[in-house]
Amino acid sequence: MTKENILKTYFELIENPRNIYQNAQLYEQNRFNSEEIKPFLRLSDADIEAKMTKSNVLDYRPDAVKTEEWESQNKRFMNYHRSLTPFTLINGLPFNHYLGIKTGLAYAENKVVLDVGGGTGQTFVNFFQYPHKLTYFLIDPNLRLLHDQFIRIYPQLLTLKMGHILGFGEKLPFKDSSADIVLCFAAIDHMADYKQFLVESKRVLKEKGQILITGHIDAPMTKRASRFLGQLFSATFFEFLARKMHQLTNRVAIDDHTVHFDNTQVIENELKNLGFRIEQSEIIKGRQFYILAQK
């Protein structure tokens, strides 16, 4: 993206306030071209050129990994994405910051990072302290553009380049041992076959490479009810009510996951069976988990 285009983008946003529940303006990511991504992919040059769009997005979406359930849940998930608000962004950041410092990955430099299920690619700048020292690839089956809320907060997203690939975690187009870090933030429970994703992660990771997985814990109904009541009788009640009305208007699903986890053991066991070493694992406040493992 040129300096002129960046200036034009920010000029348009000046004196253009947004309501927290306003539909987002969307912006293209700053992407690597085909020549820049070729060294990392196991596809032929001709195949890459054929799959590359004019806006430098590589479309590598095989139908083989889709299931009827996945297609259905993905439609529900995309309603959630369209209704994403600054409330969600701001309140999700402490989790990312906690993970980055606890795992040490926030300070990564000179690494190749594959962000599988990475959505818009905002993790590139809201997780890593030195994104300009990384080679970052966004892999997601949906073409999700940058919401203006990200642009307002993270100016680096308009300048830093990333590889943008439309694809599934179960079938990655990368060469064997080509990545230092695989991220999977709140995406493993949206996959059709998360076990195959773990197999692919092992293949593409270098020796001693690391994988960081986060997801949601399926809380018992009693805990969910208690949480709901706590929000009703809190200082954020009116915000809570407005957000629920916004979600109903946009037909956001209560549950759009393809798989549910009530602990981390099943994923840890799969990783161990593949030869990974579990470095860290934690369930945070009974709602979210993360697992850090090394190949």
Image: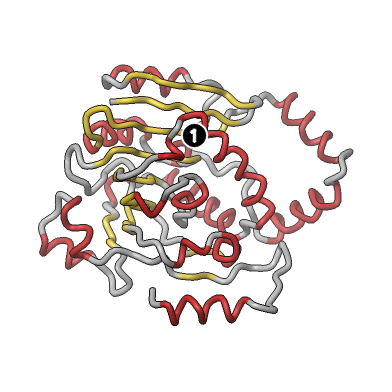
Q: Indicate whether 188 appears above or below 11.
A: above
- The way the protein has been coloured in the rendering is secondary structure
- Residue 281: horizontal and vertical position, in percent? 48, 22
Residue at 79 percent across and 28 percent down: it is 226
Circle 1 Cα neighbour tier, 10 Å, few/some/many (<14 / 14–19 / ≥20) = many
- Asked whether, in this view, residue 241 is left or right of residue 247, the answer is right
- Asked whether, in this view, residue 224 is left or right of residue 159, the answer is right
Q: Indicate whether 58 appears above or below 223.
A: below
- Asked whether, in this view, residue 68 is left or right of residue 209, the answer is right
- Residue 274: horizontal and vertical position, in percent? 27, 22
Residue at 50 percent across and 47 percent down: it is 73
Query: Image quadrant for the N terminus?
Result: bottom left
Residue at 62 percent across and 76 percent down: it is 13
Q: Indicate whether 292 appears above or below 50.
A: above
Q: Is mark 1 on a helix, strand or loop?
A: strand
Q: Which amino acid does label 1 sit on?
A: Thr
Q: Name the residue under label 1.
A: 214
Q: In which quarter of the image is residue 248?
A: bottom right
Residue at 50 percent across and 40 percent down: it is 186
Query: Image quadrant for the C terminus?
Result: top left
Total marks placed? 1
- Asked whether, in this view, residue 290 is left or right of residue 13, the answer is left
- Residue 284: horizontal and vertical position, in percent? 61, 26
- Residue 37: horizontal and vertical position, in percent? 22, 58
